[in-house]
Amino acid sequence: MPSILHNFSNTIHQLSENLLALEGETKQLDLTGLAGREWFEILQRKLIPQLSDNVYLVVGVVGGTNIGKSVIFNHLVNQQTSAISPLASQTKHPVCLVPQNFEQKHDLEKIFQGFKLTPWSAPEDPLIEDEQHLLFWKNSESLAPNLLVLDTPDIDSDAEVNWERAERIRQSADVLVTVLTQQKYNDAAVKKFFREAAREEKVIITIFNQCQLPDDENYWRLWLNTFCQETGVHPELVFIAPNDRQAATSLQLPFYPRTFEPTPSHSIPETDLDTADTDTSANLMNVISQLHFGEIKVQTLKGALKYLVQQNTGVPAYLREIKSRSHEFRSASELLSEQELAEIDNWPLVSNSVIVDAVRNWWQSQREGWSAQIHGFYNTLGRGVLWPVRYIHSLAAEEKRPPMELYREQEWSVVLQTVEGIYDRLTLVSELGNELLTNRLKTLLNGTSREALLKTLHEEHAEIDFTAQLEQLVDSEMTFFRTESPQYYTFMKQLDRIAAVARPALSVGLFFVGFGAVGHAGSQLVTDTMIQSVVNVAGDVAGGAATTTVGETAVSSTTATGVGFLEAKFRRFHAVFAQKRTEWLATAIRKHLLKSLPEELKSAVELPNSQYYQAVQNSVSELEQQLNELHISI
């Protein structure tokens, strides 16, 4: 028998560890925790502490209010230990008699998890009022070395805390000495308690107490049969005890064994009424001591294991609950996807002249040797000589704002519109009655949230160096272009060198006839003509370019060479830059508004695929297989 228990021990401990880890992950699902679930309490209070090679029995005296449980307990241990009172609901805390030196070999705190173990010094100790779950205990020389006996609070008292304490004892117990009376065999609370005991396959010894003998001999079977049919309990042993207060208080109460077999209906066969040995009283302690401890222990532990893996009430039901809840989060996650929250179709475009200047600057950085020296000299000369001309022109013309300053204002205007749209959509989602999102979105949409978000976004937006970002983009794209099309790049380099040779004559002539600064004509005429040729078509780039990647084939099927190739590149500058800017906004919205919500929803959706979910599922399968090997019907 010890080897049978040992086979389950490792699996049970692994299951417990993985369940606790899984519970931590499921907090985002808003599920009820593990504590309070019947199967989990059985796991913690029965299976983990009692699946060991050291076999002992936990016997609990249980029943309703004012039916003589403490009397039965005192007779069971053959000593006046528990306080007896004619008043109802006196026992507030369970009491336990423990064999001598038992606590030196076993951890009582683990056996009775959820209780604060307190030494028991007086019969009145369990009657005190205390919000803590106390369990009073003391050693007894009269007990068998592997037997623990408990008196318990009422399972149907007005104080609900008593129910919880009695349930914890039931979960830990192997044998329940069930005390019933004519008044307390069909109460709802009593039946609920024993339905769970039946599911857990506890060994039940029934004592029908306070009987009016011999009159009740014709009725107690009918009452007990009703109790069994309502609860599913099948008593191993049955006793009846007379209503004799003096005998009860003096440890002289007789207990008459009876034969009993539940029947499908309330009618009791006539043969059951003719019971032999009606005047022979049994010693309850001897009866308990003669039980087959090992077989009972295995039976109750197997019953607990079966309860644990039941599809409708055990761990599998918990796993299905997680999966179902995870599916509910999927729809919530889809509602909060970026595509749903923000559709931007009017993102501004950077001025074409800014892109051209950035490309020119990049090209200038690629020049080498004498070509770079000549171009650099004339660029510097042109800027210096023409400074008076540009100054006079600026006085005569209207002052124009820098292109990037204008772009910054345009982009911020779109950011404001986008944020407003996001709040409108989040508000709509919160009003659709999706309870998974409603509470989460309340915090995001409070009165100060929008103001704080816009302030943060504006501060970040003001710090952005658009020119540097565009230069980085141009460098990246042109570097890739140089690698992607080396022959085309070499051709353009050759044209650039030719332009450098012709530059002195062209620049002087153009300067004197008033064509403008040296840096804007002459030597760069060949190179810039190819770039400028696409300026007129650049305005055709869609405002929603941030959501698409414009490649060469988007322009025409003949863009591999010539102006068409550069046209496609120019369009791509617009598209990629807008894409990077919208990525900034999306990142900022997630960080400052949605915060961790998208990640939490995603994690909730993927929870059934997590490590601990799979580990719990595997442990349940392993337990089912072990039970099947023992020919246990699950």
Image (cartoon, rainbow, N blue to C red):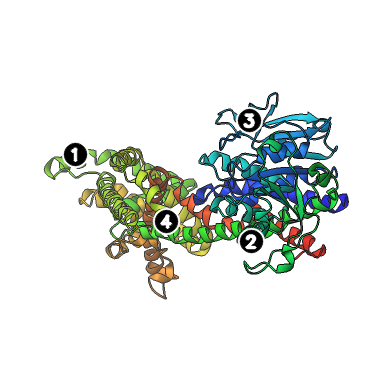
Which of these two is toward me, 435 or 446?
A: 435
Residue in the image at 69% along x and 38% along y: 248
Residue in the image at 66% along x and 38% along y: 245
Residue in the image at 77% along x and 44% along y: 50
From mark 2 to mark 3, how far is it between C-alphas? 34 Å
Of the two numbered discs 1 and 3 on the same chain, state the one appearing first in sequence. Answer: 3
Cβ atoms under marks 2 and 1 closer than 8 Å: no
Of the residues shown, which amino acid type is indicated by label 3?
Pro
Choose mark 1 or mark 3, whichever is in front.
3
Q: Is residue 120 above or below residue 290?
A: above
From mark 4 to mark 2, how far is it between C-alphas? 111 Å
- In x, y percent, where is residue 612? 65, 52
Q: Quadrant of residue 569?
A: bottom left
Of the two numbered discs 4 and 2 on the same chain, state the one appearing first in sequence. Answer: 2
Residue that carries the numbered disc 4 in the rendered image = 496
Of the two numbered discs 1 and 4 on the same chain, state the one appearing first in sequence. Answer: 1
Cβ atoms under marks 1 and 4 closer than 8 Å: no
Residue that carries the numbered disc 1 in the rendered image = 391
Of the residues shown, which amino acid type is indicated by label 4?
Asp
Q: Quadrant of residue 352?
A: bottom left
Crowding at dot 3, Cα within 10 Å, few <14 / some 14-19 / many 20+, comes out as: many
Which of these two is toward me, 58 or 517?
A: 58
Q: Secondary structure at mark 1?
A: helix
Give the left or right position of residue 1, taking residue 425 as reference.
Answer: right
Residue that carries the numbered disc 3 in the rendered image = 126
Q: Secondary structure at mark 3?
A: helix
Residue that carries the numbered disc 2 in the rendered image = 222
Give the left or right position of residue 392, taking residue 375 as reference.
Answer: left
Choose mark 2 or mark 1, whichever is in front.
2
Residue 112 appears anywhere in the view: no
Choose mark 3 or mark 4, whichever is in front.
3
